[in-house]
Amino acid sequence: MNIMSMDIILIFVFAVICAGLVKGTCPLTCSCVDDSSGSHVNCHSKYLRRIPTLPKDTYNLDLRYNNITEIDVQLCKEMPQLHTIYISFNLIIEIPVTTFAACEQLYY
């Protein structure tokens, strides 16, 4: 393999790694499926006590049946494409009014 081919391979590997860092990665406890709309993240019944760091392009988020006690008000700022979030059957007592204010795409 010549030096030019090696340079191209290194640039490709670097680009793939950087793309993953920008988008974010799927939490180990959850499963993620990517499609043309972004990431569908399923963290259903994982005994989570807090919402993990999620891919930035998350548009569908299932957090049902966990032990989550609060939702960070930064959630929508970190995931501007968030369209659907399922949070029932958790230990959430109160959700501040401003929590979903930045969720412009949120449907329900």
Image (cartoon, rainbow, N blue to C red):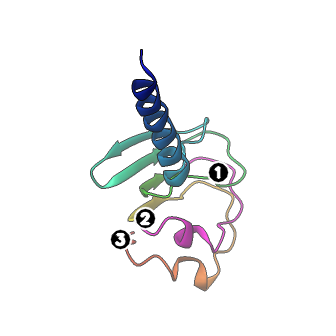
Q: Which residues are magenta?
A: 64-81
Q: Mark 3 — residue?
A: 107
Q: Residue at x 40, y 71 (%)?
A: 106
Nearer-N-terminus badge (1/3): 1
The tag on residue 64 is: none
Q: Is label 1 in contact with label 2 (beta carbons under 8 Å)? A: no
**13 or 60: nearer the viewer:** 13
Nearer-N-terminus badge (3/2): 2
Q: Quadrant of residue 72?
A: bottom right
Q: Mark 1 — residue?
A: 52
Element at badge 2? loop
Q: Amino acid at mark 2?
A: Leu
x, y (%) of residue 96? 65, 81
Mark-to-mark CA distance, 1 and 2? 15 Å
Mark-to-mark CA distance, 3 and 2? 9 Å
Question: On the rendered structure, is 96 left or right of 34?
Answer: right
**24 or 47: nearer the viewer:** 24
- Dot 3 crowding, Cα within 10 Å, few <14, some 14–19, many 20+: few
**57 or 83: nearer the viewer:** 57
Q: Residue at x 63, y 55 (%)?
A: 90
Element at badge 1? loop
In terms of secondary structure, what is the magenta stretch mainly? loop
From the image, which quarter does the C terminus lie in? bottom left
x, y (%) of residue 54? 56, 52
Residue 33 colored in magenta in the image:
no
The tag on residue 82 is: 2
Nearer-N-terminus badge (1/2): 1
**9 or 70: nearer the viewer:** 9
Element at badge 3? loop
x, y (%) of residue 104? 40, 78
Q: Amino acid at mark 3?
A: Tyr
Q: Amino acid at mark 1?
A: Pro
